[in-house]
Amino acid sequence: MEHKDSNMTLREEKIEQRLNELMQTVSDINLDISDLQERASLKNSAVKDDYDSISEEVQAVETEISELEYKFTISEISLYLIFLNLKLSFNILKNKLEVTNYLIKLFYE
């Protein structure tokens, strides 16, 4: 039984580490989007390409979040709370990306 508990702990640590990595990725993308919004208002020509690149990153994170959603058991409620925080941050990020897309259209069309 003790061996099983240590495996669960290792599993939980791996999930928590991945959640933290994803949260950092979301934070980094958020900064990139802020920069992109500023450059869009300055009509920087590379904005459209950068937007496409960031959109691809966001889609990759979304896929990973979807895969993680069902990896928790009820005993791992603390991990699930971290996951919910990640999901909320990600949804805010997606909304910010939509606003950025609107800004690009506004300044480039």
Image: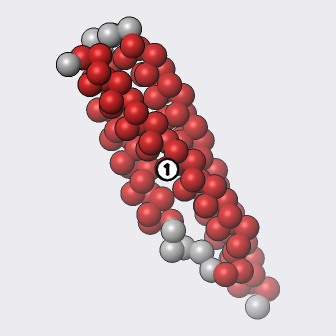
Question: Can residue 44 be seen in the rendering of this structure?
Answer: yes
Residue 23, horizontal then vertical, whole percent: 59, 47
What amino acid type should be assigned to the residue bearing mark 1?
Asn
Residue 28 in the figure: left or right of residue 52: right
Q: In the figure, residue 82 lies in which quadrant?
A: bottom right
Residue 98 in the figure: left or right of residue 6: left
Identify the image quadrant of the N terminus: bottom right
The residue where tag 1 is placed is: 91
86 above or below 45? Answer: below
Residue furthest right as drawn: 2
Q: Secondary structure at mark 1?
A: helix
Identify the image quadrant of the C terminus: top left
Q: In the figure, residue 28 lies in which quadrant?
A: top right
Residue furthest left as drawn: 109
Residue 25, horizontal then vertical, whole percent: 53, 41
Please name the residue shown 51% across and 68% down the image.
Answer: 69
Is 67 in front, or is 94? 94
Is 95 in front, or is 85? 95
Residue 40 in the figure: left or right of residue 15: left
Q: Residues within 10 Å of mark 1 (few under 14, many from 20)?
A: some
Please name the residue shown 63% across and 55% down the image.
Answer: 85
Residue 6, horizontal then vertical, whole percent: 75, 76
Please name the residue shown 29% across and 16% down the image.
Answer: 107
Residue 100, horizontal then vertical, whole percent: 39, 29
Please name the residue shown 79% across and 86% down the image.
Answer: 2
